[in-house]
Image (spheres, rainbow, N blue to C red):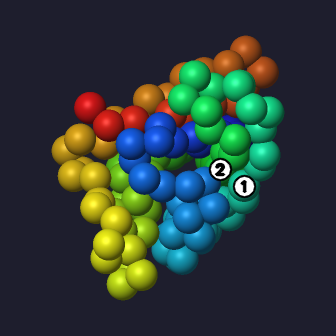
Amino acid sequence: MSDYKITFAPEVNLTAADFAESWNSIEQYRELSTAQTETVAQGQFDFGATALVVLGGIALKVTTTALEEYVKQAIAAHFKKPQQATTPAPAPERIEVQVMDHPDGTKLVVVVLK
């Protein structure tokens, strides 16, 4: 099992809480892991993120490539909500999902725009 911590660059226009809500609204993803938010110290990330999404206990059989696609689809689902009509959705081909392994086994996922 792996734990993933996800953060978003400001230009993605998505908060950790919004992503967690979107992820958890998709049954297939919720079955992999329930997304939860976690507060982080100001200045921990270069772009000022103050919250992360934590996906705990993802099975090892889920590849990094599959997780990247799931993240992109959850972002797309968020921007399809009617209340998001005024916020421009990032084009899927511009979303870049970077996964970094940490020595403690945690994986940090940074979502940026290309």
Q: Is residue 99 left or right of residue 97?
A: right
Q: Is residue 86 above or below residue 5?
A: below
Q: Residue at x 39, y 42 (%)?
A: 11
x, y (%) of residue 50?
Answer: 69, 41
Type of amino acid at the residue the image marks with label 2: Val
| Quadrant that contains the N terminus | top right
| N-term mark: 1 or 2 | 1
Instruction: Kindly identify which numbered label has been placed on residue 53.
Output: 2
Q: Is residue 36 left or right of residue 22?
A: right
x, y (%) of residue 90?
Answer: 28, 52
Q: Are marks 1 and 2 in contact (CB under 8 Å)?
A: yes
The image quarter containing residue 18 is bottom right
Q: Is residue 13 above or below residue 93?
A: below
Type of amino acid at the residue the image marks with label 1: Thr
Instruction: Kindly identify which numbered label has been placed on residue 37.
Output: 1
Q: Is residue 1 left or right of residue 11?
A: right
Q: In this view, does 34 lie to the left or right of 6?
A: right
The image quarter containing residue 52 is top right
| Quadrant that contains the C terminus | top left
Q: Is residue 91 above or below residue 106?
A: below
Q: Is mark 2 on a helix, strand or loop?
A: strand
Q: Residue at x 54, y 29 (%)?
A: 47
Q: Nearer the viewer, residue 51 or 4?
A: 51
Q: Residue at x 23, y 41 (%)?
A: 94
Instruction: Specify few, some or many for label 2: CA neighbours under 10 Å numbering under 14, 14-19, or 20 or more.
Output: many
**What's the distance in space between the residues labelled 1 and 2, CA to CA?**
4 Å
Q: Residue at x 39, y 36 (%)?
A: 112
Q: Can residue 65 be seen in this view?
A: no
